[in-house]
Image (tube, helix red, strand yellow):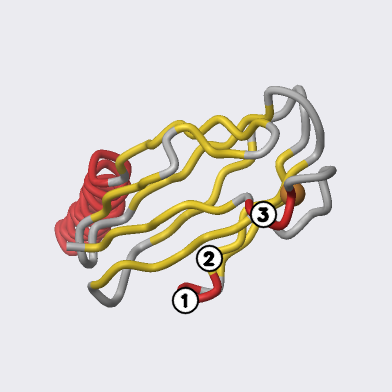
Amino acid sequence: MASFNRRKLLGGLVVTALAAATGGIAIRSFAAERVIPIKARKFTYEPDEIVLKLNEPAILEFTSADVVMGFNAPDFKVRADIIPGQVSRVHLTPFKTGTFTFLCDVFCGDGHEGMSGTLVVT
Ligand SMILES: [Cu+2]
């Protein structure tokens, strides 16, 4: 009887420790992800310069002011469709520093070719 109670107690401790560990990780990653709202409109992004920190997770939150647009940052192999009435989220943890170009990769009208922005990772 005594050994049974002991096992039960230990089992309970393991479960509690696991819950605390996973809960802790979830809270930390949530807090660390900086959310950056970006509005796309013909033929620009607002802001058109995004500054991120190396190895710091960020969520880019895109909305469109008019038509369907795209976001493509080839240096980090991330892209998204930006659809009016929706929020498009791109998770990006920059793994290199520098100044990079992102661009619209969905034809959105005359001026589309020049629709780009700058991603600065410090
Ligand atoms: Cu475009």
Give the labeled residue for mark 1. 75
On the rendered structure, is 120 left or right of 17?
right
At 83% from the left and 52% from the top, the residue drawn is: 107
Q: Nearer the viewer, residue 78 or 16?
A: 78
Separation (CA) of disc 1 from disc 3? 14 Å
Circle 1/circle 3 CB separation < 8 Å: no
- Asked whether mark 3 and ligand 1 are closer than 8 Å, the reply comes as yes
Separation (CA) of disc 3 from disc 2? 9 Å
Q: Secondary structure at mark 3?
A: loop
Mark 1 burial class by Cα count in 10 Å: few <14, some 14-19, many 20+? some
Q: Residue 30, relative to residue 5: is it above or below?
A: above
At 65% from the left and 31% from the top, the residue drawn is: 41
The spot of residue 24 in percent (x, y) is: 22, 47
Identify which amino acid the numbered label 2 is placed on.
Answer: Ala
User: Comparing marks 1 and 3, which lies closer to the viewer?
Assistant: 3
The spot of residue 90 in percent (x, y) is: 53, 51
Give the labeled residue for mark 3. 104
On the rendered structure, is 102 left or right of 98?
right
Q: Residue 28, relative to residue 6: is it above or below?
A: above
Q: Secondary structure at mark 2?
A: strand
The spot of residue 27 in percent (x, y) is: 26, 41
Q: Nearer the viewer, residue 4 or 29?
A: 29
On the rendered structure, is 52 left or right of 111?
left
| Badge number at residue 100 | none
Give the labeled residue for mark 2. 73
